[in-house]
Image (tube, rainbow, N blue to C red):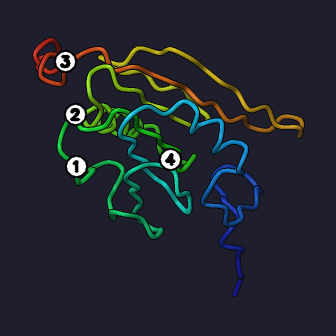
Amino acid sequence: MKVTDPHVNRRIGRRKFIEAWSWPAEVEQFIAEMCEGYVIHVCSGNSLMGDLRIDKYMPADKVGDMLALPLDPEIADTIICDPPWGVPRHLRARLIYELRRVLRVGGKLIFNAPWLPRAPGLELKEIWVAESTAPMNDCGVISVFRKIEQESDIKRRFNL
């Protein structure tokens, strides 16, 4: 019987994943300086950032799925999200729309992924890139958005 290492993701190559579940201290400080008001941290892992931490697998203030947050609409001034980097393409829009749903108009979404999201009602304000020192590695992209429209207006405009 062939034994496979559970930390190696076969879909994206022979990368070995280790438990991290939070950013290094200097990255958390960088993110914390961008936060405003009531902060919800989605996919919080072991991080203590945010007024409300939500994670499906790690101890947090609330257990919740990033695609169906157990929250009322438009309650957060800032949402921090560092989703698993292997989020399938067909779920990416659903994730961004769910984060947008919980964000107040004028609120800020701080999103870390190796892809750049786009969604109606969110205006891209900043992009930060964390370059890897290893050649040909993925890079982290922290994109910062402002919500510019209420959910009801977005749904009406796109007949949703």
Circle 3 sits in a helix, a strand or a loop, which is it? helix
Residue bearing mark 4: 83
Q: Which residue is mark 1?
A: 71
Estimate the spatial distance between the alpha carbons at disc 2 and disc 1, rounded to whole Å: 9 Å
Label 3: few (<14), some (14–19) or many (≥20) C-alpha neighbours in 10 Å: some
Name the amino acid type tagged 1. Answer: Leu
Asked whether, in this view, residue 14 is left or right of residue 115, the answer is: right
For the residues bearing labels 2 and 1, Cβ distance under 8 angstroms:
no
Amino acid tagged 2:
Glu
Q: Callout 4: helix, strand or loop?
A: loop
- Residue at image coords 65%, 35%: 30
Residue labelled with disc 2: 74
Q: Quadrant of the C terminus?
A: top left
Vertical position of residue 24 compared to residue 9: above or below: above
Residue at 35% across, 26% down: 107
Question: Which dot, 3 or 1, sits closer to the camera?
Answer: 1
Kindly check if marks 2 and 3 are in contact, taking CB atoms under 8 A apart as contact.
no
| 155 lies above or below 76 | above
Distance (Cα) linking label 4 and label 2: 20 Å
Q: Earlier in the sequence, mark 4 or mark 2?
A: 2
Asked whether the beta carbons under mark 4 and mark 1 sit within 8 Å of each other, the answer is no
Mark 2 or 3: the one toward you: 2
Q: Amino acid at mark 3?
A: Ile
